Image (cartoon, rainbow, N blue to C red):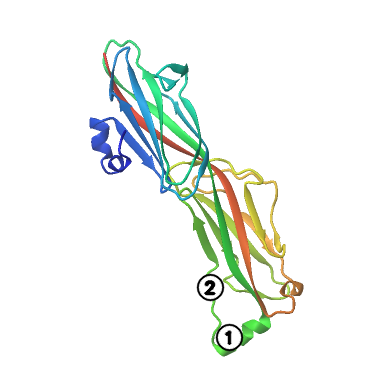
Amino acid sequence: MCDPMKALLLVSLIILVSGCTSVATEGLSVTLQANPSRIFSESFSTLHIDLDNHDSKMLSNVVVSAFDTGILKAYNVDNYGNVVYEICSVDVGNIVPYEFRTVSCLLHAPALEESVQTEVNTRVNFNSFLETNQLFEIITENEYQRRVALGNYEQKSRSYTHRDSNVMVEIDFNEPLPLIMTPGKKYFVYFQITNVGPGIVGDIAPGQFLIHTAGDILRCPTEVILTLNGREFPRVACEIVLDRDYLQGKEFVVSDIGTSLAYNYELRNALKIDVLK
């Protein structure tokens, strides 16, 4: 099999010499190698697709497939090399943290009158998740004045980010923290989901992005489908509804906002293969 670290460091050289390419996130790396790396007319080669999960999270519903294989035909084969399906698509299931798996498919070259170079494209689809928890403080105007008078009032950032190797969730309050409970003033919190990996994020359906907080103080839109636009999804805006009852007679309260994002991710890779007449 192809060494993923060598593939990352020596991509150009390895493509020329051994027919190996790699695409990687901080979580999953996908490496392709054909054996043999050059195919003669009307002969076969085996495509090895190496999956290396560097993440501390399990990846679920992993499916590996070849598509747009140029002049080559790709087939699923069993452990004895027999063709099972006239497509290359393998349901891998779950890949646990730090697990390495290999999927193989058979490539067949047609009869040729001259040598050509063709390209085999692959994709790996999987499901993953990102959970966040952001603390924030709510204080009364009296508490604000008291802290200012004592010289220990500290204004904190309004924006916070949480990420894994594929996606990032930014939590942005409309005011710097802490939130000062002022009569008639409205507070909002915004959530921005961004694709930070080399792959493609699928649409986020209702129920896949959940927002919660203690005390039921958020008013958020429901039943919204989020579709990626470039690298970012549309921003989700929620109103923070505060009243004196929420503080229960206290001058300040530390609360939290939690999010849970279940998403589908797709990594693609391609390998150029010489087909000789």
Q: Is mark 1 on a helix, strand or loop?
A: helix
Q: Which labelled disc corresponds to residue 156?
A: 2
Residue visible at 64% across and 57% down? Answer: 237
Instruction: Name, please, the residue furthest toward the front.
Output: 80
**Residue type pointed to by label 2:** Lys
Quadrant hosting residue 21? top left
Name the image quarter holding the N terminus. Answer: top left
Q: Do the residues labelled 2 and 1 touch (CB within 8 Å)?
A: no
Q: Where is residue 200 in the image (x, y as percent from the top left)?
A: 49, 40
Residue visible at 62% across and 65% down? Answer: 256
Above or below — where is 192 with respect to 21? Answer: below
Residue visible at 60% across and 66% down? Answer: 174
In 3D space, how far apart are the residues under numbered discs 2 and 1 (Cα atoms)? Answer: 14 Å
Residue 70 in sight from this viewpoint:
no
Observer-nearest residue: 64 or 240? 64
Residue at mark 1: 148
